[in-house]
Image (spheres, grey):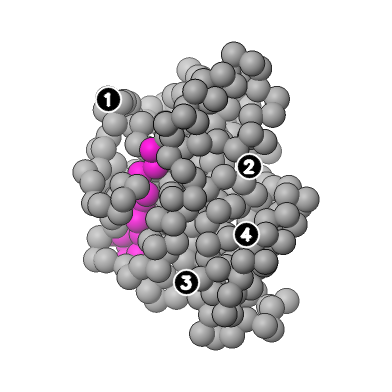
Amino acid sequence: MPDRSVTTSTRTVVVTGAASGIGRRAAVQLASAGCHTVVVGRSRERLRDVVSEATAAARYTGVVTAVAADLADLGQVRRAAAQIADLGPITALVNNAAVFDLSRKQPRLTVDGIEETFAVNHVAPFVLTAELRRVLRENAMVVTAASKRLLMLPRLCLDPGDVDSRRRYSPIRAYFRSKIAQLAFTAELGRRGVGAVALRIPSVRVDDDKLVGYPAYLRAPYRIKALYAADPAAIAAQYVGLAAGPPTDAARYVDERGRDVRWTNGTDVPTFGAWVWDHTAALAAQPW
């Protein structure tokens, strides 16, 4: 049921991957700005912690609602979308959730038969956005998390015969191909009349709880990275600003300072964007 404490003037912003890292900090900042913040995550326990922290920071009309969903399961994504839609019109959707597991040696397929990294990072945002389309305000913004490290892989592209990288799997290839698909999706959203922006995120400090279960040889590089990586709160602040819009005639691709940057890997090419869109819709059996 809709939260009756949310007024028609409240800006409702949905943040996925809100249990930790950038997403958690964005949820707290949005609540502090007076938004109705809908936090989406897999763990109910961790979501309760986020709700508690964000509610304590809430000001004005700020309200926090938790929706539990495993984005690797498209059935759960659709059920989450139905719950969110019941809350009323949405001002912004921040597709922040991502999987990047360097310890994984073999592809892991989801219940829908899709390689998990591609499913969570790209297919789930596509489905969630499509399912919420009817409640997106006319001037709504869809914000997507991109990666600055794609600049180091200018020749990487999607393989039509192995789009989700399950056949020639490596965690790095799977992750960055999913990011290419996300960028193409963002550009195509703009062409289809939806306010859209992709935030190019640099190396960011990782919360310790994200490294639980990693072997020591993989945790060590993250410890070193923490010495120079960006503050996740600063990246979260960019989410907050971008979610406020206003939408532009075409999708934007911006860096961590909000400056427009050049699209990479051919992701702004209309024919490629349409191909990614159609392939994803078929993969997820998701009409638009």
Sequence-first tag of 3 and 2: 2
The residue tagged 3 is 91
Question: Which residue is painted at 49% across and 23% down in the image?
Answer: 224
Question: Which residue is painted at 58% across and 27% down in the image?
Answer: 101
Of 40 and 249, the residue lying toward us: 40
Report the Cα–Cα distance between label 3 and label 1.
36 Å
Report the Cα–Cα distance between label 3 and label 4.
14 Å
Sequence-first tag of 3 and 1: 3
Stretch of the chain drawn in magenta: 186-202
The residue tagged 4 is 39
Sequence-first tag of 2 and 1: 2
Question: Which residue is painted at 39% across and 42% down in the image?
Answer: 201
Residue 149 horizontal side relative to residue 133, left or right: left
Q: Quadrant of residue 216?
A: top right
Q: Is residue 271 above or below residue 134?
A: above
Q: Identify the secondary structure beneath mark 1.
A: loop
User: Do the residues under discs 3 and 2 have CB atoms within 8 angstroms?
Assistant: no
Q: Amino acid at mark 2?
A: Ala
Q: Identify the secondary structure beneath mark 3.
A: strand
